[in-house]
Image (cartoon, grey):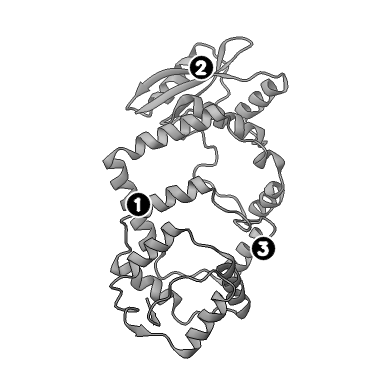
Amino acid sequence: MYKIYALVDPRTNQIRYVGVTIRDIEVRRYHHLWTAKTGYDTHCYRWIRQLLAQGIEPSVLLLEATNDRDREKWWIKVLREQGTSLTNETEGGDGGAPMKGRHHTEDTKRRLSIKNRNNPKLTSWSPSGEIRQIISDKAKARWKNPEYRDKMATHMAQLAEAKRGKKRSPETVQRMSIGRKGKGGRKGWTHTAEAREKLREARIGKTNSEQTRKKISESNRGRAVSEETRQKISKAHKTRIRPEEEIERLRQRMKGNKFSSGRPCSEETRRKISEANRGRPKKKRGDGQCQ
């Protein structure tokens, strides 16, 4: 279902722009505001910036809900025939994209990249809590639709198939590395206790398929772990105290494990276990086998 909407000038209550969307029209209005704040240069966004400079924003009006996307053209034509001063730069039907069918030159792409790289207008603005809630509710409603989930699953499978076997060139890898430097990524970031619990509950009862396990095994085969990484892992494990519930889960999970049950520990493994447990409270020991 398409929604033909209009942006209205609050000073005169006149329609200044006609558009079409499948989203909530209030979300679309905020997207127009965000684009205007980035400095995008069209008649519509220059008009919006003029309103914002006066401390006001355009309102949005639903003109029609229809299955015919071309009704946008009809509204633009009728309003212009009535003498309405619209900021639309096209006759409609193209999604308001003056660049549709055209491509930036490499020089233009480079200049746009340099201009936008540190543009605070692109990073400082974010939608309000109300708009984020609308977006969230809409996304959750879509995901409840089995047809939508099937469509997304098919789409993701097609993307995976298209990328399979393709490797990024060294130049692309280098550009990505340079672009990510200084941004931090997830370094130093941790999940909250609530998020960790949700992730844990989501994984209960789920196991990786044989194909997935094979892929993980093949990707890790031959991968060497540096001595520095080994020391970090060792240090993290030495200072970590597992809760009793986790210990019990691990004990139950390892029961009947054909790869460990009944296998005696080597002398080197015994020595490492002894060193790791040195200074810890004594617990009931097993029979000398890896359990």
Q: CA distance from mark 3 to mark 2?
A: 49 Å
**Residue 224 can be seen, yes or no:** no
Residue 230 in the image: above or below residue 243: below
Q: Tell me the kind of residue under disc 1.
A: His
For the C terminus, which image quadrant? bottom left
Disc 2 packing (10 Å; few <14; some 14–19; many ≥20): few
Expressed as whole percent of the image width and height from the top left, the position of residue 68 reads 33, 27
From the image, tell me which residue sits under label 1: 155
The front one of 81 and 232 is 232
In what element is the residue under mark 1? helix
Residue at x 38% of width, y 62% of height: 248
216 to the left or right of 209: right
In what element is the residue under mark 2? helix
Expressed as whole percent of the image width and height from the top left, the position of residue 188 reads 63, 57
Q: Tell me the kind of residue under disc 3.
A: Ile
Q: Are marks 1 and 2 in contact (CB under 8 Å)?
A: no
Q: CA distance from mark 1 to mark 2?
A: 40 Å
Q: Quick one: label 3 or label 1, which is nearer the N terminus?
A: 1
Depth check, mark 3 against mark 2: the one in front is 3
Q: Quick one: label 3 or label 2, which is nearer the N terminus?
A: 2
In what element is the residue under mark 3? helix
Of all residues, the one furthest to the bottom in this rendering is 267
Residue 233 in the image: above or below residue 121: below
From the image, tell me which residue sits under label 2: 80
Which numbered marker is on residue 178? 3
